[in-house]
Image (spheres, rainbow, N blue to C red):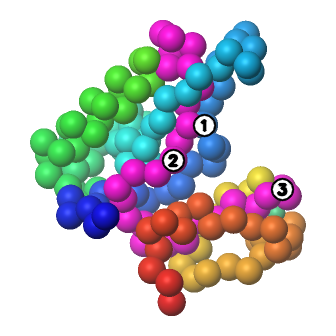
Amino acid sequence: MPNHKRQRRVAFPPKMEGFKPFGIPATELTTVTLLFEELEAIRLIDYEGLMQEDAAAMMNISRPTFTRIYNKAHKTIAKAFIESKAILIRGGNYIADNYWYKCEKCKEVMVALKPLSSCRNCQSHNIVLLNSDIMPTH
Ligand SMILES: [Zn+2]
């Protein structure tokens, strides 16, 4: 179903698929999901130190929408920390201006303006488009 909410611009793909807590057996591990745009909100505010107005502009969304995304990101991370859950970073309602790839062989994450056919680092053709759900096919 098409989603008519305005998409949030995300500038960089995460270099990992998520986080796992130490000391929890894999069989007992449950997960929470952190959306790409929620990680981007954390990156812009807590890592880059932007004001919320500027971060909202970077992501091409309103300030209230940004605040909602940012607060949800914190809530998700807090839940993972307190309840010893793994965090999966995936999906969401976002757009990117570029192609994000991950090499399955050397795990390199690449941002490209055009589609790639091989890894820039190890030349493997075993690369995965991370944001295939949002890129136009052309
Ligand atoms: Zn590679």
Circle 3 crowding by C-alpha within 10 Å: few under 14, some 14–19, many from 20 = some
The answer to whether residue 135 is left or right of residue 72 is right
4 or 71: nearer the eye?
4
Give the mark nearest the N terminus, 1 or 2.
Answer: 1
Give the mark nearest the N terminus, 1 or 3.
Answer: 1
Q: Mark 2 points at which residue?
A: 90
Q: Mark 3 points at which residue?
A: 106
Give me the residue at 21% from left, 59% from top: 5
Circle 2 crowding by C-alpha within 10 Å: few under 14, some 14–19, many from 20 = some
Amino acid type assigned to the residue bearing label 2 in the image: Arg
Residue 16 placement (x, y as % from top left): 64, 44
Residue 37 placement (x, y as % from top left): 38, 48
**Secondary structure at numbered mark 2:** loop
**Secondary structure at numbered mark 1:** strand
Q: Quadrant of residue 11?
A: bottom left
Q: Mark 1 points at which residue?
A: 18
The answer to whether residue 48 is left or right of residue 111 is left
Number of labels in the image equals 3
Q: Quadrant of residue 129?
A: bottom right
The span shown in magenta is 80-106
Amino acid type assigned to the residue bearing label 1 in the image: Gly
Magenta stretch: residue 124 in it? no
Amino acid type assigned to the residue bearing label 3 in the image: Cys
